Image (tube, rainbow, N blue to C red):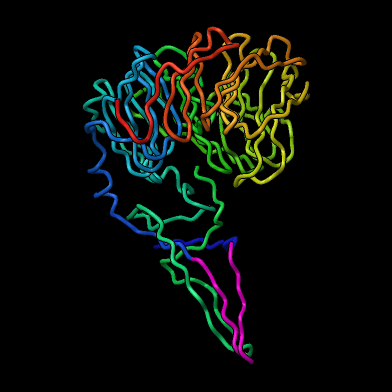
Amino acid sequence: MKNYFFTPLLLSLFALSCTKDRVDEHYTFFRPVYATKETVKTNIKSSAPELLQNPGKLVIKDNILYLNDLDKGIHVIDISDPAQLKNIAFIHIPGCIDMAINGNYLYADCYTDLEVLDITNPLQITVKQDLPGVFPHRFYNNFVADTTKVIRQWVRVDTVVSHRFSETVDYSPRRDWMLFSASSALMTATGAGLGISGSMARFAQLSQRLYTVSSDDLKVFNVTREDKPLFVKSVDLQNGNIETIFPYTDKLFIGSQTGMFIYDAGNPDQPVKLGQFMHSRSCDPVIADGRYAYVTLRSGSSCGGFSNQLDVIDINQLTSPQLVKSYSLSAPAGLAKDGKFLLICDGKEGLKIMDATHPAAVNLLGRVPGIDTYDVIAMNGTAFVVAKDGVYTIDYTNPAQPRILNRILKTENK
C-alpha cells in the first residue's frame, strides 16, 4: 500500500488575474522520480574518484577522510599528508546524507534504509548488511514513499489552475505528486575503532551503540557485532525539529531548532532525557567539552529565526543547564574544539579560531576568510573543513595566522 503526505508549498509566486468571473492561480509542484530498490542497491559500489558536487558531512578514520556528497555517495580522501590531499575513490550510495564508522565498517543511510559496508579496503567496498525501512521519515515533512521503491530525485513542475469564482476547485495533487516547503531542510565520538564525525552529524556512536536522529525521534542500534547492527528501539523526542547529535562521556547532546537536549545513555538501550536549554528558533549544532557545551545559532535558512551567535552553556548541572554568555557571529554552522581552541564555521566569514580558555570571555584569535564554511573536524593543530566549494585542510598551530594547507574544489580532483 502506498502512503503519501502533502504539505502546503511556501510559494515564491502567487498571482491572481481575472477577467470578470475567472481567476488564475499559480502553483509549484515537485514530482518524485522513482527507482526500484533492487536497482539502487546494485549501484552501491566503489569506483574511481569523482568530482565533488554537493559536499556535506564528514568522518575521519585512519588517515582517510570520508566526505558525503549529498544523495550521491561518499568521497574517499587520503589525508595522511594534510598538505597533499588525494581524492582516491568514490563510494556510490544513492540517497546518502549521513554516516558513521565503527572499526572496518561504515554505516550509511540509503534513502529509508541503513547500509553496512566493509571498508577494510576503501577502494573496493562490499555491502555486508541492509536494514530496510529503518528511516521511514527520511523524506521531506515525513513524506513516506512507496515501500518497494525509492525516490531518486524531485522534478519541479510549475502549473496554473484556472477556474470561475463560482467553481469549487480541488487543489489536492495527484497521488504520485507531492507539495512541500520550498525551504525544506536538506538535510563525535572518538574511541577505539570509531571514526571522528563533524558537529552536523545525525549519526553518533557510544557504548557499542549507534544512535541516529530524525526530526522527531532517536533510534538505537546495537553494534556489538560491528558488521550486523540490530535495531533496538525508537525514542520519541517530542520536541521535534531535531538536527544533530553529539556523544560525550555517557551523554547524548541533541541539537534542535528550538534548543539543546541532554540525554543520559548510561543504560545504552534506554536513553533518558536529563535536561534542556531552550533558545530562539534557529539552526543549532552542539558540541560538549568538560563542563561546557557550545551551541551555534544560525538564521536565514529553513530553520527560521533571527539569531546568529555562539551560546556557551554551563552543563555542570545536567538537569538545569545555564547560559554563560552569547557571542555575536555572522552565519555560524559547524564547530569543533581542540584543547582551548574553539573553531567555528561562520558561513561566508570563513573559519574562525577562538580562545575558549575562559568561557565567559571567548575571544577571536584569527580566521581564514574567503571560504563559505559548513563543518569542521579539528585535530592537533589541523582543521579539516567542508565548505560550499569543496574541502580544505587548515593549519592553526599559529592561531593568529591560520593558513590553508591544501584543498579539493568541486571543479577539480587531486
Q: Residue 65: x percent and y percent? A: 38, 22
Q: Is residue 223 magenta?
A: no
Residue 334 image offset from top left, x and y in percent: 56, 28
Q: Is residue 359 left or right of residue 234?
A: right
Q: Residue at x 66, y 42 (%)?
A: 239
Q: Nearer the viewer, residue 239 or 119?
A: 119
Q: Position of residue 250 (x, y in %)?
A: 58, 18
> Which one is nearer the viewer's eye here, 319 or 278?
278
* Quadrant (top left, top right, bottom left, bottom right) of the C terminus: top left
Whether residue 259 is situated above or below residue 405 in the rendered picture: below
- Residue 154 sits in which quadrant? bottom left
Residue 1 visible in rendering: yes
Front one among 270 and 328: 328
Left or right: residue 236 compared with residue 52: right
Of 82 and 264, nearer the camera is 82
Q: Is residue 206 above or below residue 152?
A: above
Q: Position of residue 51 (x, y in %)?
A: 31, 35
Give the residue displayed 56% in from the left and 30% down from the top.
Answer: 245
Q: Quadrant of the N terminus?
A: bottom left
Residues in magenta, as a range? 12-28
Give the number of marks: 0
Q: Quadrant of residue 153?
A: bottom left
Residue 250 appearing in the image:
no
- Relative to residue 326, is residue 11 depicted above or below? below
Residue 13 colored in magenta in the image: yes
* Residue occupying image coordinates x 35% and y 59%: 33
Q: Quadrant of residue 318?
A: top right
